[in-house]
Structures are given as structure tokens and as C-alpha cells.
Amino acid sequence: MASELMMENQPHHALSAIIIAQDEADCIAQAVRSCQHFADEILVVDGGSQDDTPAIAAELGAVVHHNPWPGYAKQRNYGADQAAHDWVFFLDADEWVDDQLAAALNDWKRQPTLPAQAFSISRIGDFLGVWLAQRPESHIRLYDKTRFRIKDVLVHETPDVGDAPVVKLPGTVLHAGFRTVGELAERFNMYTDLDAQKAYGEGQRFNLLRFLLKPPAKFLQMYLRNGMFRAGKAGLFLASLWSYYIVLKELKLYEIDWAAKQPN
């Protein structure tokens, strides 16, 4: 009987946790430590840090791979290719896994059969000292790399699972992405560049009605429908910033189209 119980508690599935990072010395340790509770291997893929990110990760037992930054999707696929195990779990350097998700991942490892080849998680972020539980995001972070790869897009990359089933795991990834409003505005500027280029490449063009309606619609969606009014001023400010994000993206889409039509 004791041997049977031991066999039941043995993990059936091993997984590699992969963290992509660059100049994240202030937060990489927390990300790595949170993976130590469930991962059979922790890889940090460093895109060219000028700080102590690689050294800190290595001191904590992570395997560090250096790969000059090729873009988000390519860097994640590079990390998956280096992983020793077929199942990979992705985390960003400014994120960490809460206790509930770590326990769920350990339970997942002990399942003799799995209901899917891809699993999603909830993620919440912080802003001005407030954790925005009113706006959880859902992301596919655990998947079988022999079945799927990250879709090669400029931004908002995710495993290309097609019509395959995706099962949600309990627990949360906490994203400490806020440093300052200025840094957030810089990040929005970078992401809207990529978003506009991606949209243009997919055939989307500037539309005046969309430009007029989508920013206020985004604000109302986040502030009222997603309940960010419950977060007080932090929710009001962040909903406003996401409206600004849409304005920037649409203006940049117009700029790309305008530039393409200019004579050489």
C-alpha cells in the first residue's frame, strides 16, 4: 500500500520554466524563486543585459542562455528550443507565480493523463500601489512545445494552438509591471509602434470612425464593464491611459499608411 501511494505521488510530467529577461536585476530573483516551487528546470533567456540580471539568475540555480534580442515571439521560441522538457511554462522577469498556482502546477505534474496540451492562467497587474484584481487577463503560459509554437507576430505573442482545447489552471501570475507613469508611457509608445505595424501588415488601415469611437469605448469597457472604478483613482487613471494607447496606435497606423503613399 505504501509503495502504491508513493507511485501515485510521483510526478508524471516534467516542465521547464522559461523566463525572458533583459536588464531586470531588480525583479529577476523573485521570478526565479517563484518557479523553484514547481519547475524541474528554470531557464533564463537574456537578450543582452547590461546589469546583473544573468548573474543573479545563475546564483539562484537558473540555466542562463544569452541570445541577442530578436523580438518577443522569437525569443520565447528560442527559449522553448533550449528547454530539456517537452512541457514549458513561460514567465516574464517582472512576474511571479502565487502559491495557489504553484500548487496547481504541482498537482498538474502528478496527473497521469492530461485534459489538454495547453493551459491558461489568470494574470493581474499593479498600478500606483494598487493590485488590479478587477481586470484579470487570461494567457496561455503552459503548453507542449512538441505540439505548439509561439506565433511569430510583433506583439501580443501567444502559442498558436488553433482549435485545440485550452484548460484554465487555478491561481494567478502577479505582474509588477508598473514603475513610473513615464516608464509606462514609454512602454506604451513602444508597444503601439509594434501594434500599428502588426495591424498594417495584416491589412488594417486607418478608419476615422474607429478612431473617434474606439478610445472612449475602451475607457468605458475598462472603467465600467471591467470594474476598474472599484480601484479608485488608480483605476480611473489606468483606464484613461488605455484609451490613450488606442489613440496612439490608430495615429501610428495612419502615419504608416500616409508614409507608404508618399513619392520616393
Image: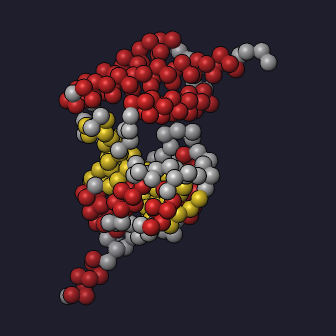
74 vs 7, left or right, is: right
Is residue 34 at least partly visible in the picture?
A: yes
* Residue located 35% across and 53% down the image: 96
* Residue located 64% across and 19% down the image: 257
* Residue located 34% across and 60% down the image: 34
Q: How many marks?
A: 0
Quarter of the figure that contains the C terminus: top right
Q: Position of residue 230 (x, y in %)?
A: 20, 29
Please, is residue 222 above or below residue 172 in the view?
above
Please, is residue 151 above or below residue 78 in the view?
above
Residue in front for this viewpoint, 225 or 90:
90
Quarter of the figure that contains the N terminus: bottom left
Please, is residue 32 above or below residue 84 in the view?
above
Q: Position of residue 33 (x, y in %)?
A: 36, 62
Q: Position of residue 259 (x, y in %)?
A: 68, 19
Is residue 146 at least partly visible in the picture?
A: no
Q: Position of residue 191 (x, y in %)?
A: 51, 33
255 vs 5, left or right, is: right
Identify the colour scheme used.
Answer: secondary structure
* Residue located 48% across and 31% down the image: 186
To which quarter of the image does residue 39 belong?
bottom left
